[in-house]
């Protein structure tokens, strides 16, 4: 690790250093690979894709709302005809509901696809920003001057704010999906086949909830790991900087001007949720989902018991 | 110094979460507790250390306590204002000296404010200012080197752009002043007082690994150091720096940086060329452990042959190398633990003198707010 070879070179040894600096300067003249995709480029491109996905989702939601209202009106017509006891009216209402169910299902499918595309696009932006943030944090760790660290920190904060806003938006997505039990009710006129079908619906919903629980638990694990690494990195830098331990008996080239505490690598901007808050939200949601799943299974069990009692 | 530290510490204590209203909020608050054992060796002398001891080896047991935080004072999409503080105390029990044992105590503190303004869609502007200071009681002789007490003030203006055609640019300018706390019986410390200003321009490209090339220039005046030129009696340095940095992100993170410096002065003795090689590696380990490795090697050579000691002996060694290795793990939700090993070596061309530090420490970081 000693550098005596160079150090003892005296005046002559300055030549290789100068040559090295010249090489660095020459490197500056290398044509920039503008066609190469950088992390910054990918951030920009994925932002545009997210904008497009948002527009497509809003359009799909608008179209779905229209057919959903039409289909609801047809179902209401069926209920009215049933209450009136008019077979002709009921038949016409069924036919209308049948006709409107086709575009309803199409638009529902399209809305689901658009929502998935939006989630994918958002996740793609989040992932590339995370990569870029990792780059910036590590560069801050290795920064050899307060000025360099400050400049990197500006970039970090802007991107981190955007990341947390996107994460909050992703959080809003699952909060927009209320954990309520589906309208599957027992009806005295139900045949055993009807009850069987209703029980199956509840069990399928429970399976979906279970899958969602596993997905959210994986997300919690990933966020927790990210939070842990972020903390340890910040603590590492702060610990080595605080008491000037990285400053050996050398002052040249290492100005002792104000240095940014490593703990400043956090976010400013609109009150974004922190990683901890996001984890807590996910944990709360998982609890809700687990309760929801259990209730579904209990109700499915009740339906099946009713089948057995009807059969006996 | 104690006044500055008081301001820093009280700023942290008074701005407790319960008192924070509206937009003002803590972004981070960390209480640090640590202990270490360090071994020092070498025969490098330091002109700023008042006592000389003949020993070449010393050992110290060290305990430290620190508090740092980030407080957001204003935040809007276009503008943000952040206040940062960091303070701490470190107490050592040093043995192995021939004269006596020492119990050096260090107090450190820093605070700064930063105003960031977004410039439309193409960049952002940042204005910052800050102070930093430290003091040392019962400072031991070499080879147990501790930075002397000082205070600095600094300010800067920076500009960073978004990528244009895959290339982003950054520019910053700064000024700083450093005042070393010269004691009555140790006026040599005043030799280190300086005022500086400089700028740096950077450009980055590539992907997924990236390359950043940067260059800058700096003017530094040492108004208490002579130049041996009656017409221009005080030392004035001009420093040009260029660097290249390669970064590979991923599960295993790697970064290598090469930095070249040309220092020229109105005095022959501090003119030198230097190259620094920097490496950083971060990797996850089994069992939720993580590893951080950081090292810097510095190579330096002087331009002119002169017959007497250069610079300020002991405070500006010819070469310095640093290596840090840390293995960390979360112990609880708000508590992290880490084991850190540090190695440092500096050499001067005066009688092949050297200084070496080798240490190991255990660190705990507690976040009372859970962030």
Image (tube, coloured by chain):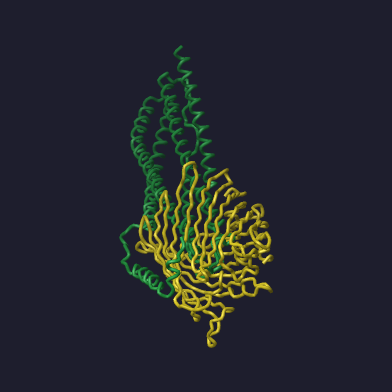
Taking the image as shown, residue A206 lies to the left or right of residue A99, namely right
Residue nearest the viewer, comparing A272 with B368: B368
In the picture, which chain is yellow? B
Q: What residue is at 40 percent from the left and 64 percent from the top?
A: B244
Can the viewer see residue B240? no
Quadrant position of residue B50: bottom right
Residue B44 lies, in percent from the top left, at 56, 66
Chain A shade: green
Residue B272 lies, in percent from the top left, at 46, 74
Instruction: Residue lying at the far top in this picture: please name it.
Output: A312
Residue nearest the viewer, comparing A130 with B185: B185
Residue nearest the viewer, comparing A273 with B311: B311
Rendered position, A172 above or below B259 = above
Residue B266 lies, in percent from the top left, at 49, 81
Residue nearest the viewer, comparing B301 with A113: B301
Residue B163 lies, in percent from the top left, at 39, 62
């Amino acid at each position: 690790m000693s550098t005596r070879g160079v150090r003892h070179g005296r005046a002559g040894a300055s030549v290789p250093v100068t040559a090295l600096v010249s090489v660095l300067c020459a490197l500056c003249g290398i044509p920039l690979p503008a066609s190469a995709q950088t992390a910054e480029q990918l951030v920009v491109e994925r932002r545009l894709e997210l904008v497009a996905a948002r527009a497509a989702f809003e359009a799909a939601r608008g179209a779905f709302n229209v057919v959903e209202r039409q289909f609801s009106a047809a179902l209401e017509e069926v209920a009215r005809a049933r209450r009136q006891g008019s077979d002709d009216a009921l038949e016409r209402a069924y036919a209308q509901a049948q006709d409107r169910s086709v575009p309803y299902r199409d638009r529902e499918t399209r809305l689901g696809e658009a929502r998935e595309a939006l989630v994918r696009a958002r996740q793609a932006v989040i992932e590339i920003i995370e990569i870029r943030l990792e780059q910036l944090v590590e560069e801050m760790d290795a920064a050899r001057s307060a000025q360099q660290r400050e400049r990197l920190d500006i970039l970090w904060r802007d991107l981190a704010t955007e990341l947390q806003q996107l994460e909050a938006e992703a959080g809003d997505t699952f909060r927009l999906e209320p954990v309520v039990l589906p309208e599957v009710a027992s009806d005295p006129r139900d045949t055993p086949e009807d009850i069987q079908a209703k029980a199956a619906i509840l069990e399928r919903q429970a399976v979906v909830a279970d899958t969602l629980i596993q997905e959210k638990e994986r997300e919690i694990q990933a966020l927790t790991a990210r939070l842990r690494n972020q903390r340890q990195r910040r603590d590492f830098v702060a610990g080595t900087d605080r008491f000037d331990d990285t400053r050996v008996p050398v002052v040249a080239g290492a100005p002792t001007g104000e240095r940014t505490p490593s703990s400043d690598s956090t976010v400013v901007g609109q009150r974004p949720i922190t990683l901890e808050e996001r984890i807590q939200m996910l944990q709360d949601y998982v609890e809700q989902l687990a309760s929801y799943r259990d209730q579904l299974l209990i109700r499915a069990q009740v339906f099946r018991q009713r089948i057995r009692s009807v059969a006996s | 110094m104690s006044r500055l530290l008081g301001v820093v510490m009280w700023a942290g204590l008074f701005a407790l979460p319960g008192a924070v209203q509206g937009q003002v909020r803590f972004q981070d608050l960390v209480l640090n507790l640590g202990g270490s054992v360090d071994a020092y060796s070498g025969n490098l002398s330091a002109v700023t250390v008042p006592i000389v001891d003949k020993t070449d080896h010393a050992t110290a047991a060290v305990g430290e306590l620190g508090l740092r935080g980030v407080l957001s004072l204003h935040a809007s999409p276009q503008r943000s204002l952040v206040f940062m503080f960091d303070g701490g105390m470190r107490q050592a029990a040093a043995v192995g000296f021939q004269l006596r044992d020492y119990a050096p105590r260090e107090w450190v503190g820093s605070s700064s404010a930063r105003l960031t303004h977004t410039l439309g869609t193409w960049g952002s502007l940042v204005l910052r200012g800050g102070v930093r200071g430290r003091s040392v009681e019962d400072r031991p002789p070499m080879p147990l080197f501790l930075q002397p007490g000082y205070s600095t003030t600094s300010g800067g203006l920076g500009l960073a752009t978004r990528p244009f055609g895959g290339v982003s640019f950054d520019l910053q300018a700064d000024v700083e002043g450093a005042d070393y706390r010269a004691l009555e019986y140790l006026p040599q410390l005043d030799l280190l007082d300086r005022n500086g200003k400089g700028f740096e321009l950077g450009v980055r490209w590539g992907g997924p690994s990236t390359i950043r090339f940067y260059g800058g220039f700096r003017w530094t005046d040492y108004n208490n150091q002579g130049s041996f030129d009656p017409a221009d009696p005080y030392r004035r340095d001009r420093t040009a720096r260029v660097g290249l940095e390669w970064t590979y992100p991923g599960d295993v993170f790697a970064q290598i940086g090469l930095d070249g410096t040309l220092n020229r002065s109105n005095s022959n003795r501090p003119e030198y060329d230097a190259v620094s090689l920097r490496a950083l590696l971060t990797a996850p380990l089994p069992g939720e452990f993580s590893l951080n490795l950081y090292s810097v090697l510095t190579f330096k050579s002087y331009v002119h042959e002169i017959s007497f000691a250069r610079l300020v002996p002991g405070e500006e060694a010819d070469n310095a190398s640093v290596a840090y290795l840390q293995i960390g793990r979360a112990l609880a939700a708000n508590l992290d633990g880490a084991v850190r090993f540090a190695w440092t070596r500096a050499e001067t061309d005066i009688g092949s003198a050297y200084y070496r530090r080798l240490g190991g420490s255990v660190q705990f970081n507690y976040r009372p707010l859970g962030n």
